Amino acid sequence: MPRTVVVTGGAAGIGRGAVERFLAAGDRVVALDRDVAALATLPPEVIGIVVDVADRAALAGAAESLTTVDVLVCAAGVQRYGTVVETSEDVYDEVMGVNVGGVFFACRAFVPLIPRGGSVVVVASVQAYAAQKGVAAYSMGKGALLSLVRAMAVDHAADGIRVNAVCPGSVDTPMLRTSAAEFGGGRPTDEVVAEWGRSHPLGRVATPGEVAEVIHFLSSPAAAFVTGADVKVDGGLTAQLAVVL
Ligand SMILES: NC(=O)c1ccc[n+]([C@@H]2O[C@H](COP(=O)([O-])OP(=O)(O)OC[C@H]3O[C@@H](n4cnc5c(N)ncnc54)[C@H](O)[C@@H]3O)[C@@H](O)[C@H]2O)c1
């Protein structure tokens, strides 16, 4: 039986990977994204809705257009850099508004439409566990998502709704390539991405499809006893100590 799946940030990157995975399973997919041009490139069977997840009223409006949502995938997010001292108030507000508020208020809008057996999957990050330098607000926000996932798992267990997170390492998406261009010192982006991949024990970055596969699993009956979990999809990145012997 096809399910109705809502994916925030569904027009590109990991969210798009999720859209394609659920489409392949025969589900009805609704993609919410603020990028109008990118939404227009999705397969025609995807229902695209232009929404900025930082806009609470827009999220509520999108939910009003639907009756039942079996799966909510929260993938919209932005990557911003800076220590706590360097991060401007505007950048802090943007990161919290999109990466944390965008998830909280998407759940607030769509969870009431999720029937028993449905689920929420939140895209957090390995940066919820450990930080690189200069990502104070982003890292804080991803940590907050894991707390939200646990709180929601407890709150909605009695409703038959499971809530889980995936924590990716580096994934080859427009976001990663923008960072590679910014921090690559003028080197070709492919070279920088490959170098970042070598810092993962598996020796490469992930594809969006590999993260989407885990998102799909967590939403499926195969994961019926999994809730409140954060699943690393990081090629072993966080398993490794940076000690050279
Ligand atoms: N790429 C990685 O290496 C990586 C690693 C760990 C976690 N993540 C997380 O995965 C998620 C997706 O990242 P990605 O790499 O696919 O990013 P991306 O920038 O490649 O794609 C993100 C999509 O979300 C949309 N989006 C961004 N802000 C939005 C907003 N306010 N409202 C609606 N749509 C919005 C964008 O338009 C885009 O379509 C993010 O939460 C990110 O933090 C990414």
Image (spheres, rainbow, N blue to C red):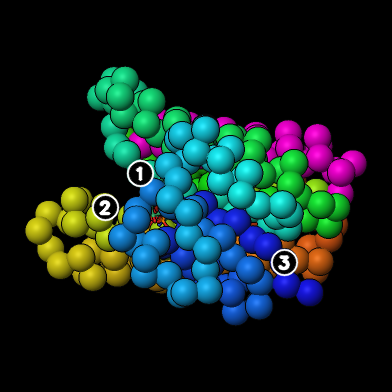
Residue 232 location (% of width, % of height): 59, 56
Q: In this rendering, does residue 55 appear at all?
A: yes
Q: Residue at x 74, y 47 (%)?
A: 113
Amino acid, disc 2 = Ser
Residue 88 location (% of width, % of height): 27, 23
Question: Is residue 195 in the magenta section?
Answer: no
Q: Residues within 10 Å of mark 2 (few under 14, many from 20)?
A: some
* Residue 96 vertical position relative to residue 223 in the rendered view, above or below: above
Q: Secondary structure at mark 1?
A: loop
**Between 78 and 146, the one nearer to me in the picture:** 78
Q: Are marks 1 and 2 in contact (CB under 8 Å)?
A: yes
Residue position marked by numbered label 1 in the rendering: 79
Give the left or right position of residue 162, taking residue 211 as reference: right
Q: Residue at x 65, y 35 (%)?
A: 108
Residue position marked by numbered label 2 in the rendering: 179
Span shown in magenta: 135-160
Q: Residues within 10 Å of mark 1 (few under 14, many from 20)?
A: some
Question: Is residue 137 in the magenta section?
Answer: yes
Q: Residue at x 73, y 54 (%)?
A: 68
Q: Secondary structure at mark 2?
A: helix
Number of the label disc, if any, that sits on residue 37: none
Give the left or right position of residue 124, taking residue 39 as reference: right
Q: Residues within 10 Å of mark 3 (few under 14, many from 20)?
A: some
Asked if disc 2 is less than 8 Å from ligand 1, the answer is yes
**Between 113 and 151, the one nearer to me in the picture:** 113
Asked if disc 1 is less than 8 Å from ligand 1, the answer is yes
Q: Residue at x 37, y 31 (%)?
A: 94
Amino acid, disc 3 = Arg
Give the left or right position of residue 9, taking residue 230 as reference: left
Residue position marked by numbered label 3 in the rendering: 3
Residue 196 location (% of width, % of height): 32, 61
Q: Secondary structure at mark 3?
A: loop
